Image: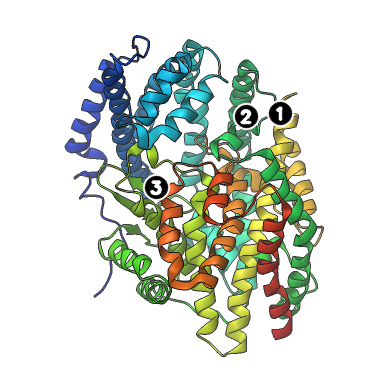
Amino acid sequence: MTISLNWDLESIFTGGSQSSALADFLGQVIVDLDEFQPHLDPLTSQNQPEWVTRVQKLYDLSARLHQASAFVGCLVSHNVKDDRAIQLDAQIDQLSAQLRTHWTKMSALFAEQDEAAWNDLVTNTDLKLTAFNLNEERDLARQKMPPELEALAAELSADGYHGWNRLHNTVSGDKQVTLSKEELSLGQLQNRYEDDPDREIRREAYELYEASWTELEKTCATALNNQAGFRLTLYKNRGWDSVLKEPLMNNRISRDTLDAMWSTIDSKNGKLLDYFTAKAKLLGIDQLHWYDVFAPISQVAKTFTYQEAGDFVIEVMERFNPDIAQFCRMAIDKEWVESENRPGKRAGGFCTSFPLIGETRIFMTYNGSYNGMLTLAHELGHSYHDWVMRDLPYGARHYTMSVAETASTFNELVVNDASLRATNDSKEQLSLLGAKLNNAAIMLMNIKTRFDFETAFFERRAKQQLSVDELNELMVTVQKAAFKNSLANYHPHFWASKLHFYITDAPFYNFPYTFGYLFSNGVYAQALSEGPAFVDRYIAMLRDTGSMDTETLAQTHLGVDLTKPEFWETALDRVLGDVDKFIALV
């Protein structure tokens, strides 16, 4: 059966951005948001049922707005010129701010309640499965400004803070370029400079990419500086002295865990320089350029149709975990994936969930490369993670970015290993090992660049706005440090081109990728050692990601301490062991 390259959104709301069903749905959300009263008498055994009802209504509003936001996000992504969808996106930001205000006021009420009455509410009522999330909200309320100020900040953020993110999405999505007489979006151009096996095309694409972002640099700098200014002002008024406080809380990890991970990486990622030297030899050059680092090994440029990629992912997952394979088959057959390679789409890829119907949708631009197949496997992993949690209450389904990459990277590892086993051709093995090590370079060097850039940027932005030249200089400085001065050139406008810097829903949208990558390697190692017996434990771990902090999750399901270097050393040794295999083949 031929599979579709486009996702099915019509089964969610018919008519796209002009959908009358969506308009009615949002209209009812607006009414219910306006009618919701975030005020309750102090919690007692007598009014406990009213508290339960009010909290459940708030979760219901959250799930419904999530559903609408996911749908509109899909519309904006697959057609960046859909002006109506862009308007709806802005409207949903406003509604989300109103919802956040309700949560802020309710959380402030949570914080004021008697401990015994509160504990009884979250342990002996229908809210017990969401107790972890409710306690999080309560604890956070005690660390924020008074509720009326938090409500004002949330309302102002809709047109202010989040508006800068929408601006970046718009200008980057609208930009079209011509490469070899072909009209491309910036997302397509990025694919060319990273994935094309022809080095001359990569060079041309990279230079055009840098030139394109140079044209957009002032707009991007304005957006980045003003986003950061909003956050720094908000943190100052909350009394937070570190820009990492919020991302650490958002990811449910401690600073000790983050420091243990980065320090171990810094001590070991120099091993990748041996890979870079060997790769440069294969490419016939003395030293890798930025546009060579993530390029495929040129001797083997195997391509896959979208259908071939999907079938292969399902086949290898079937041998490893039939439950994941069955899910992947369903998701592809039911047209949950938007994969078409065409202009007019935003850059990047994502998986988004629709909590009311227990479904997901995957967005990507599939280009036929091995990396494209890995992206498909990766996003299907995200989708599976949501799938196994679909029967949980909405308040127990929120997992953080730190563990969001677990199932996705797990799928990638299975596909990588299966691909290596499937061939005896040394050139193809080189290509596949190169793809794995390219990913390692992203996780251990490229993302370290992003983390170090944001850390330094916020430190300097606290004193003054940074000019374009200062942003470029800072970016090159951290790239050189993260890549240990191993490259012939660098990407000064990476701060402008990398959309993750502009995502306002999740500050420091960088280190969780590396965390998830290494964490997933640890999970995969246990899966390999335990075989089929690990399947149920794997599902149980994924289901608990919405109800535990990350250190507890790792201790409970893997028996490891994330604040110590031992776990990270083991994971890194496993990853970097591929370097010696690659060099031996070279």
The structure residue drawn at horizontal position 31% and vertical position 19%, both measured from the top left corner, is 51
Quarter of the figure with the C terminus: bottom right
Q: Amino acid at mark 1?
A: Arg
Residue 455 x, y percent position in the rendering: 71, 38
Q: Is residue 488 visible?
A: no
Relative height, residue 4 to residue 501 (above, below): below
Name the image quarter holding residue 321. Answer: bottom left
Circle 1 packing at 10 Å, graded few (<14), some (14-19), many (20+), is some
Q: Nearer the viewer, residue 73 or 241?
A: 241
Mark 2 and 1 residues: CB-CB less than 8 Å, in contact? yes
Q: Is residue 575 visible?
A: yes
- Mark 2 vs 3, N-terminal side: 3
Which structural element holds mark 2?
Answer: helix
Residue 511 x, y percent position in the rendering: 62, 47
Residue placed under numbered mark 3 in the picture: 77
User: For this view, does 109 lie left or right of residue 527?
Assistant: left
Mark 1 and 3 residues: CB-CB less than 8 Å, in contact? no
As measured in the structure, the alpha-carbon distance from the residue carrying label 1 to the one carrying label 3 is 30 Å
Which structural element holds mark 1?
Answer: helix
User: For this view, does 156 lie left or right of residue 247?
Assistant: left
Quarter of the figure with the N terminus: bottom left
Residue 287 x, y percent position in the rendering: 78, 69
Circle 2 packing at 10 Å, graded few (<14), some (14-19), many (20+), is many
Q: Amino acid at mark 3?
A: Ser
User: For this view, does 448 lie left or right of residue 197?
Assistant: right
The structure residue drawn at horizontal position 55% and vertical position 72%, both measured from the top left corner, is 529
Residue placed under numbered mark 2 in the picture: 228
Name the image quarter holding residue 200. Answer: bottom right
Labelled disc at residue 461: 1
